[in-house]
Image: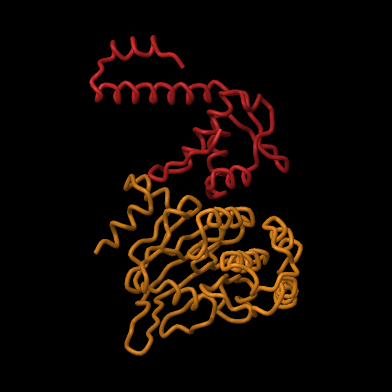
Chain colours: A red, B orange
Amino acid sequence: MDWIIDKNRPICPQICEQLCLRVAAGQFAPHEKILSVREIAVAAGVNPNTVQRSLEELEGRGVLYSVRGSGWFVGENIAHAREVLDDILAKKTADYFEAMRILGMDSAAVKEYVKEWKE
Amino acid sequence: MSEIVCCTNLSKTYGNVNALKNISFTLDSGKIVGLLGPNGSGKTTLIKLLNGLLTPTKGEIRIGGQKIGVETKKQVAYLPDNSYLNSWMTVKQIVSYFADFYEDFQPEVAYEMLSRLDIAPERKLKTLSKGNKEKVCLILVMSRKARLYVLDEPIAGVDPAARDYVISTIINNYNPEATVIISTHLIADIEQILDEVIFLKNGEIVLQSTVDEIRTEHEKSVDELFREVFKW
């Protein structure tokens, strides 16, 4: 999974979102150690201070917890990470329907189109 | 969080040209700060003042509470906008030159970064490409354990892939107690690693803000805001 950063939005919530996606997708199991601040900063090409703030934010929500001297781990509140994932799925789907509407397909037609879609 | 740089009513004039006009600002430690402005806005003048290469016409600069002098120079690692190294020297000679010169220079850090770039220490500087020479200069600066890093146009002369290298070098060597000032006009390439920005225009500060404030308040990237502020 690549880190995709939109420069028009504050970066901190974007890092939170993308970490939640990884947790929700099962890339990290509960109590498993995740990447370090620096590793995330280098991979996403963002400021380490921003990454630190994002991790603290997720710690506040129970998605992550930190152990002094050994790093960051996945916490118990995976439900929050799933909610974030659901929100993004809903938003992407709504965007898709909107894009199709502009192309002249109403939602019934889009649903039919998706059902017939072959990958 | 402590204050690392403090400028009060700072002015610099060259003859009858006012390069900096009565600017005041402070920077906290632990920040990556972008010093942004079009050509001729006073970026390099400000940087040279921070390094004691120029003296202010009026006003005062303090670094870590001290006036510019030997003690502040020990704490400031400076990457100038043009190379000042002897091109007949080998990379190894330059590394040991730096190790002699700066108490806080860490040769092992420099060699590790050089080997990651496949630059052999036996190479003479003049046999390196322009981009690689610039990378060597950056490595030398980032191998110091300074409190303030001042990088004047670190990405102007290198290709986009090398820009990514420069950015990851800055992130990798960044220490949370130190502050990094990066002057550039290539904002889009660097803005995602900045905490704060200072916009300079005709020798005056037109904006000092955190980048997340810019993104939240203006709903646009620093690059877009810059284009708006400096529209002509």
Residue in front for this viewpoint, B164 or B6: B164
* Position above or below: B136 against A45: below
Q: Measured from the top left, where is residue B134 in percent x and y?
A: 58, 67
Percent across and percent down for residue A56 are 56, 39
In screen coordinates, is B27 left or right of A90? right
Please tell me which residue is depicted at 36% across the width and 90% down the height of the picture.
B15
| Quadrant (top left, top right, bottom left, bottom right) of the C terminus of chain B | bottom left
- Residue B167 drawn above or below residue B72: above
* Apparent side of residue B197 relative to residue A71 in the rendered image (left or right): left
* Image coords of residue B79 (percent x, y): 56, 70
Is B41 left or right of B170, judged from the image as shown? left
- What percent of the width, then of the height, locates residue B168? 59, 53
Q: Would you identify the image quadrant in which residue B65 lies?
A: bottom right
Looking at this rendering, what residue extends furthest in the bottom direction?
B15
Q: Is residue A107 left or right of residue A30?
A: left
Q: Nearer the viewer, residue B29 or B38?
A: B38
Question: Residue B112 appears in which quarter of the rendering?
Answer: bottom right
Report which quarter residue B208 is drawn in: bottom left
